[in-house]
Image (spheres, helix red, strand yellow):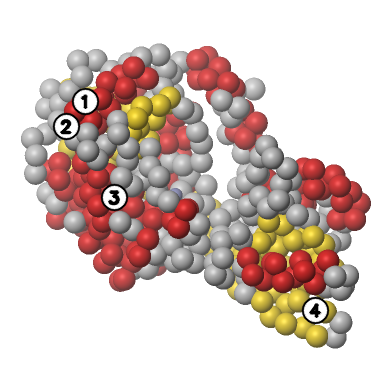
Amino acid sequence: MGYRWLRWSTEHIGHRLTGSVQGARAEAAADSLFRLSGLPLVQRFPFRAEAWARGTVRLTIGEGTAWSHHQAVALANTPLEADVEAPLLDAGNGLASDWEALGEHVAGHAVLVNLGLVGAPSGAKNLHRSEKAALARAAGAASVLFVNQVEGGVLLTGTASIDGTLLNIPAACIAAEDGAALRERLHSGAPITARLTMSNTSAVVEANNVIAEIPGTTRPEEVIVVGGHLDSWDLASGATDNGLGSFSILDLARAMATMPAPERTVRFVLFMGEEQGLLGSRALVQHYRASGELQRIRAMINLDMSGNPQGFAVGGPEGWGALLASACASVRAVDSASFQGRAEEALWLHSDHQPFLLAGVPVIYPLSDLGKHVYGCYHSSCDDIHLVDPQAMVNNVRFVGALIYWLSAQETLPSHFTSAVLRERLIAAGLEEPLRIGGDWPWD
Ligand SMILES: [Zn+2]
């Protein structure tokens, strides 16, 4: 059912951008599907947040007296109004070493930067587009043209801001083919001028996380949250990011509503606002903290671009690693043909589990490999239903469902993180710096 519902949504709703008409329709559809499936408790959790939305963008390239238009999409959190004309400069991969090598040449230029790593020295670590944009700005660039590495005219969006505030120089993505052609002409010595004009909006929008619950039979006060973001970027229908996860959760809820209730309470949460900065999950966790509800949440399972999971990873204190390993072994005992039963311990950021983790809640995510053809379309104009394997969604429901029943049947579950242990683990995982850059580091 999950796949059929998702296909319907991509055909009749389209994208699910938070704050847009389509986003509101997706919330209404999810709410209805939970109710139609017979979930006993369904509610919407409204929140308000500042959200950026694209308006128009125009890229014109000048060579001598000839000007031509090129396809481009604005990255999110770029200026509301900009009109910048500047000579074009190749800044390679946009890593710290690239800016160092260019030095003062960057000032006042439109810079061409690869999103992926091209011809980088071995061992070089790529940076997030927002980090590259911040480095470009610090080096004095007037605008940034990000070159996508996926062939076929594919354009990518996503935030260009490291901390949620608007970047003060325009940044847009252009296709791999366009980037290659511009580079070739730049390297032949031709002076090129890039004029990037954009107009966007940023406004306080109202959106709703859509939540359904099955009360536990013997430990109803203990809650296992299974969540994933329903919202998507607006360049395509967001079928894999994150239709895969969110519609699998709708189907999981449908299936569980027909089965005996688990011992602990299961709460299904479809978040909005993830793409603009985890807006819905931050608001919900803040509410749980204020209301005392947080202590009841024993674990949070996050499905973001997960499909056909082959195991699970957990970020939790002492006891969770061993517990998850037995859970995976027990799920594998039921179906060793399609589930490898991998179990890992890891800490990671940048999806809706992050606010839960920073509040000390143990977090779990399915281990998936969707393939290059899917990851190349993430946040892009090609993230559509043709990329979705129906069986991958069925296996989300089967294996995540089995994990939930197994966890909810345990006599006891290990505790939350203490503040000290969480701090130590985040530092060991190298996550202090990115959390500080994003203004999310909970300690001083
Ligand atoms: Zn996502």
Q: Is mark 4 within 8 Å of ligand 1?
A: no
Q: Which comes before the other along the chain, label 4 or label 1?
A: 4
Q: Which quadrant, please, contains the N terminus?
A: bottom left
| Disc 4 from disc 1: Cα separation | 63 Å
Q: Which comes before the other along the chain, label 1 or label 3?
A: 1
**Is residue 195 in sight in this rendering?**
yes
| Residue in front for this viewpoint, 191 or 203 | 191
For image coordinates 60% across by 33% down, the residue present is 435
User: In the image as oriented, which residue stretches furthest toward the bottom?
Assistant: 65
| Residue in front for this viewpoint, 301 or 216 | 301
Q: Amino acid at mark 1?
A: Ser
Q: Amino acid at mark 4?
A: Gly
Tag 1 residue: 330
Secondary element type, mark 1: helix
| Disc 1 from disc 3: Cα separation | 20 Å
Tag 4 residue: 62
Q: Position of residue 207 (x, y in %)?
A: 40, 54
Q: Which quadrant, please, contains the C terminus?
A: top right
Is disc 1 surrounded by few (<14), some (14 to 19) or many (20+) residues within 10 Å?
some
Q: Is mark 2 within 8 Å of ligand 1?
A: no
Q: Quadrant of residue 175?
A: bottom right
Q: Amino acid at mark 2?
A: Val
Q: Which mark is residue 392?
A: 3
Q: Quadrant of residue 20?
A: bottom left
Secondary element type, mark 2: helix
Q: Which mark is residue 334?
A: 2
